[in-house]
Image (cartoon, grey):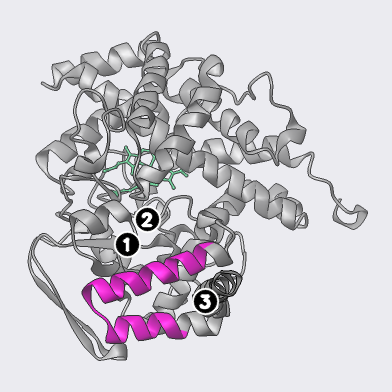
Amino acid sequence: MCVTMCAFSCCLLVTLSVPLLLFATLLVPEISSAFYRAQVSYFDGTGLLVAGLISTGRHFTYCLGDYLGCVKDQFAKELTETFSWETGVGLVAIFAPSMAYHGDKVGTIYFSHEEYRRWAYDPAAGRPPDMMVASNKTSLPAGVLPDLSPSILLNFDTGSEEHTARRQLLADGLPALAYGAKLPGFMAPQHVSPSDGSKKAAVFDTIGYNLFRSLFGVDVAEVLPAIFEYDATFTPAVLGAPLLGFQGRKLAEIRASVMRKVEQGDVARKFMELAEERGMPGKERLDEMVWIALFAGYGGTSNLAYETLKMIQKDPKLVKLFRADPDAFMLEAARVRPPVGGMNPVQYRNSTKISFSSIGKIWNAKTGELAMLLSSGANRDPQVFKNPHDFVPGRENAERLLSWNNEWGDFKSCPSVAGCPAAPRGCPGTFLSMNLAKQTVAFFIDKIPLAPSEL
Ligand code: HEM
């Protein structure tokens, strides 16, 4: 009996330790790159999906779970090493569970500046109507999508009639989104002090508080903890991970509590009236906007401020650089740490043949197939940004970053955030988010400890 138990334990140990050891070798960057190159060169379909999931697991382990500050950069590094900046497009296993389950297991990813722009500036880029970022809508429990209509702005092809009308409504109905908008003075919530800059909740609360004051003229102090919980619950759905029914119900409940605050303000009333005048359901459009503000607005902007503060805390010399030119500093911070992954999945409207000469493969993208775009690649493209890994506020081509999907410089030239030929699909929250993130960083930066030589 004892001998059998011992033999079983030994076998189990060997069986478990071999794959673990193999996985551990992937933590060596060169081995990981070679593994990625081999998988896209020799595997297809399910084989490539499994290998890709192992690579994804490796990146999360190597980065200790830091998706924004590290995992995306690992993906970009291996893509560029394998497919080259000149090709600018590569192949990946679809690591988002919902996307892979409902669609193809392998897809194309556009990562160079030029190839990212090819989609983001296409005035008629196709978008899948059934996706919420990396989640297929059918896999989301009730409560994750806006209550009144699951058809969100993100679902419409660029420049389609509905897309244009909804963006025009945002531009006209929400004055805080305009370039150079006059915003209410920055205020930290009462419970937050300048020495709280390393506390995620304090930074997120500060953004949330000022975001809703600026956008809708209302005070959401009471519901800030709930909004923080909302973001943590919602984020996995953005990455295509499953959410449970009770989480969907919680999201709907929190959104309703925020909506009750928003509806008390004049901005919401006027926004709904304007929508009705234009033949759109006012309440439904406001419902969508609150949903977006809680997702792109709160999450994206808070992550920009928080990641920037983390960077400064690691290297306090940066305080001086921030003080010298906060605008240039924040633009550069958004370039090296894009706070969202990139444009939402796009959809081929025609079949397209792509040649990957570096691995000797031709890919036939089918009509209806999805593709992804990676701003962490585009923003570090050496063809546009010299020494792209250096942090240089005010660098040459600084305004060409794609963190807000279209170039900041182009978007700035448009008369409004409604979208224009120069920047047809820039994020409408570009200027507001930059303003709030900058003021939030400035608020916390004074309490970052400095060496006397850095004062
Ligand atoms: C640092 C913060 C932010 C970043 C990096 C960011 C980035 C982006 C990106 C990359 C997109 C995808 C565009 C697409 O797939 O078509 C997007 C879309 C969008 N963002 Fe932002 N965003 C931020 C903050 C905000 C804020 C504050 C708002 C407004 C409250 C906002 C509103 C929107 C809207 C409405 C869309 C949909 C645009 C469309 O489909 O045409 N974002 N954003």
Local SS, label 1: strand
Local SS, label 2: loop
- Residue 445, percent from left and from top: 73, 42
Q: Quadrant of the N terminus?
A: bottom right
Disc with the residue nearer the chain's start (3 vs 1): 3
Local SS, label 3: helix
Q: Amino acid at mark 1?
A: Leu
- Viewer-side residue, 219 vs 59: 59
Q: Evaluate whether residue 397 shows in this view.
A: no
Q: Going 22% across and 13% down the picture, which residue do you hit?
A: 273
Q: Quadrant of ligand 1?
A: top left
From the image, tell me which residue sits under label 1.
Answer: 373
Is the stretch drawn in magenta largely helix, strand or loop?
helix
Q: Amino acid at mark 2?
A: Gly
Is the residue marked 3 within 8 Å of ligand 1, measured from its CB?
Answer: no
- Residue 182, percent from left and from top: 48, 26
Residue 151 versus residue 118 in the image, above or below: above
Q: Which residues are magenta?
A: 34-60
From the image, tell me which residue sits under label 2.
Answer: 342
Q: Going 29% across and 14% down the picture, which residue do you hit?
A: 270
- Mark 2 and mark 1 in contact? Answer it, CB < 8 Å: yes
